[in-house]
Amino acid sequence: MRTAVFPGSFDPITRAHIDIVERAKELFDKIYIAVGTNTTKKGFFSHDERLAIIKETFALQTDSIEAVLFEGLTVDFCKKVKARYILRGMRNAADFEFEKAIALNNAVLASDIETVFLVSSSGLSHISSTIVREIISNNGDVSQLVPDAVVNMVRRK
């Protein structure tokens, strides 16, 4: 079985993230959307809120997509769930340089785990969780940038 881990903070998950997962379903039998902690970012949504949002967003696809929390190194989590692939999305050249460095270091840590990059679909490359959080913080409308589950969670906060 071809299993991939799509790691990130997903704070919050965006339509660009969803696009990556939807396209990756053609490549992998199972995708773990792995919500981790980014020590360089202050969280907007709690880990449990992020997990709930992702589960609601992908509710009808539970066989091939699973949302989970994880701590530590992505490669260690990959080994735990027997995933041979790390899935990453890229919006631009800056993302490529950053993601390439991570992929090369992951290859040193676990040479049997391959990183697969998918480039953002046209019309989605401008979306970032950081910008979405800023819009939410200023009471802006993010409904075109995120799934309904995020909008609903914002309303409940």
Image (cartoon, rainbow, N blue to C red):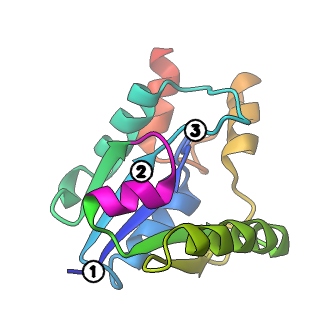
Amino acid at circle 2: Ala
Between marks 1 and 3, how big is the CA–CA gap?
Answer: 27 Å
Mark 3 or mark 2, whichever is nearer to me:
2
Characterize the local packing of mark 2: few (<14), some (14-19) or many (20 or more) Cα atoms within 10 angstroms.
Answer: many
**Badge 2 vs badge 1, beta-carbon distance below 8 Å:** no
Q: Which residue is mark 3?
A: 11
Q: Is residue 42 above or below residue 73?
A: above
Amino acid at circle 1: Arg
Circle 1: element type: loop
Whether residue 76 appears in magenta in the rendering, the answer is yes
Q: Position of residue 31 (x, y in %)?
A: 32, 65
Relative to 97, 85 lies left or right? left
Whether residue 129 appears in magenta in the rendering, the answer is no
Q: Which residue is mark 1?
A: 2
Mark 1 or mark 3, whichever is nearer to me:
1
Q: Main secondary structure of the magenta part?
A: helix
Front-most of residues 100 and 44: 100
Q: Which residue is mark 2?
A: 34
Q: Which residues make up the magenta segment?
A: 70-80
Q: Position of residue 10 (x, y in %)?
A: 54, 45
Residue located 58% across and 79% down the image: 117
Image quadrant where one finds the N terminus: bottom left
Between marks 2 and 1, how big is the CA–CA gap?
Answer: 16 Å
Picture mark count: 3
If you read the primary sequence from the N terminus, does the residue marked by circle 1 or circle 3 appear first?
1
Q: Is residue 126 above or below residue 42?
A: below
Characterize the local packing of mark 3: few (<14), some (14-19) or many (20 or more) Cα atoms within 10 angstroms.
Answer: many
